[in-house]
Structure formats: C-alpha cells, structure tokens
Amino acid sequence: MKQVDKHQKYLGIPTVSGRSKRMVFRNLLDRVWKKLGGWKEKLLSRAGKEVLLKAVIQAIPTYLMGVYKFPVAITQAISSAMARFWWGGKGEARGMHWLSWDKLCKPKCMGGMGFKDITVFNDALLGRQVWRLIHFQDSLLSRVMKAKYYPNGDMLTASLGHSTSFSWRTIWSAKSLVKEGVMYRVGHGKDIDIWRDP
C-alpha cells in the first residue's frame, strides 16, 4: 500500500480549498465536459439526450452539491454545457437554442422538459444537511459542528462567526431556507422559546 503525505481528494471532494473556489470545482466541470464531449459523436434522439442529461450529467455534481454552495459561474457553466448538448450543433458550431434553459427546467406538465435547475437543487441539498444537523444531533457531523460553531445553542440559532470553513458557510447559508418552512409541533411545550420561535 502506497503511503501518501497529503490527499488531494477524499470521497471526490478536494481536501484543501483555497481562496479561488473555481479551482475546487474545475475537476467537476472537466468531468461534465468530458462526458458531453464523448456523446457528441454519437447519433442520439431527443429522448436519448434527455435520459443521458438527467441520469448522468445531473447526477455527477450531486454529492458535491450536498457539501458546497456552487458559485454562480459554475452553475452557469454546467447549465450552458447541458443546453449546448441538448440543442446540438455540428462540430464547433453552436445550434439554435429555441427555448431558454430556465424554461426547459420547468416540469413537463408546465411545458418544460423537467431538467433540474442546478442552483435550486444545490440549495435543496444544503437545506437537507441543515435538517440532518437539527434532527440527528448524535451523529458525528452534528457533534463536530456543534462543538465548533454553536456550542451554547442549536443549528437554527447559530451565527456565522468569523474565519469559518467554506463548508460551514455554505451549510449556514441554507439555514434561512429551512427556517421558512419549519415550525414546532407543540407537545408539552417545555422547549419552546415563546419570544423567538415561530
């Protein structure tokens, strides 16, 4: 077994993220472009393109989206690559885009194709992490986050703090999304703060 001093990636996620967040996601973009570039040579119907985009391309960034908030430039790059593949084109020529990608992301019953909006899906996965931190307080992740970022409170009352990690900042940014839909099931009422809780 080879001994390694420093791992570049762990579970597909870069272990070190510097100031340039675009560098963190470069490998992800390369994987997306490589997949799409390999398919351009093949003859695919619209249904085939739809299945490949939904089953393969939109699944590639899923794990990373549950940990990090993607910069706008990254989500736009992924969306534009999928749109270019969907509308096609010969060689380097760009095909005519008859509908915007936002309209194609609408459900089929509303006239779209049902593709995932990468930004909305990213927010949903980060909101799921917040939900897990609230409900599974005995998990290792929850105990580490509580000890480091909110030792005297809970996830919903935690502040962002100073000099925090990129992971904590992205999970904390989804807290407002969760707070919009969360409310107490009263029960005995001993844990409710009647002045602050919704």
Image: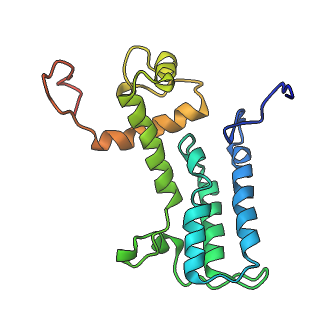
Q: Residue furthest front?
A: 1
Residue at the location (84% across, 27% down)?
4
Reply above or below: 104 against 72.
below
Colour mode of the rendering: rainbow
Quadrant location of the C terminus?
A: top left
Q: Residue 174 occupies which quadrant of the picture?
A: top left
Q: Residue 89 occupies which quadrant of the picture?
A: bottom right
Q: Residue furthest right?
A: 2
Q: How many marks?
A: 0
In-image side of 18 versus 193 (left or right): right
Reply above or below: 64 against 131.
below
Question: Which is nearer the eye, 71 or 31?
Answer: 31
Estimate the x, y position of residue 44 in percent, counting from the top left: 65, 81
Reply above or below: 40 against 182.
below
Question: Which is nearer the eye, 89 or 77?
Answer: 89
Q: Residue 189 occupies which quadrant of the picture?
A: top left
Residue at the location (35% across, 76% down)?
109
Estimate the x, y position of residue 80 in percent, counting from the top left: 63, 68
Estimate the x, y position of residue 14 in percent, counting from the top left: 71, 38
In-image side of 37 versus 1 (left or right): left
Residue at the location (59% across, 65% down)?
79
Q: Residue furthest left?
A: 188
Estimate the x, y position of residue 101 in percent, counting from the top left: 53, 72
Quadrant location of the N terminus?
A: top right
Residue at the location (52% across, 80% down)?
99
